Image (cartoon, rainbow, N blue to C red):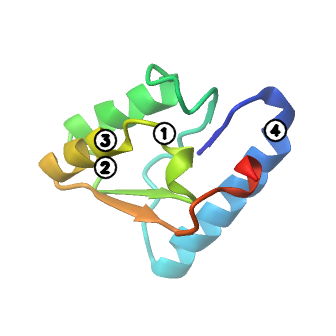
Amino acid sequence: MRVSTRKQAEYLKRQRERLVDYCKSKGLKIVDIIEDMDSGLNMRRKGLKKLLKLIREGEARKVVVEYEDRLARFGLRYLKEIFDDYGVELIVVNQENKSPEAR
């Protein structure tokens, strides 16, 4: 989960609640909840680095995001390749082009 600024902390909380509910409804085990308050353009976010470490160590089999842009604004294609290389499924709950935050 990601938001760009601290002003959006409430949106981050609601995003977390929606994703936890989604995972529970699908019977998915939550290994970790990773949150970032930083630009989706920043590919050095702590949360993103943590996610990649979990993937490399075989700790994550599925990554659930509300919108693709919550994972990254750019470079998503490369992240998907990494996920594929490690057998990690990316689950995007809402397939719309933009998150509510971006509207």
Q: CA distance from mark 3 to mark 4?
A: 25 Å
* Mark earlier in primary sequence (2, 4): 4
Residue bearing the label numbered 4: 8
Residue bearing the label numbered 2: 60
As drawn, 93 above or below 58: below
**Quarter residue 59 falls in:** top left
Please, what secondary structure does the residue beneath circle 3 have? Answer: helix
| Residue 90 horizontal/vertical position (percent) | 35, 59
Q: Residue furthest top?
A: 44
* Mark earlier in primary sequence (3, 2): 2
Please, what secondary structure does the residue beneath circle 4 have? Answer: helix
Quadrant for the N terminus in the image: top right
| Residue 24 horizontal/vertical position (percent) | 55, 73
Q: CA distance from mark 1 to mark 3?
A: 9 Å
As drawn, 81 above or below 27: above
Count of numbered tags = 4
Residue bearing the label numbered 1: 72
As drawn, 50 above or below 29: above
Residue at image location 80% in from the left, 38% down from the top:
9
* Cβ atoms at labels 1 and 3 below 8 Å apart: yes
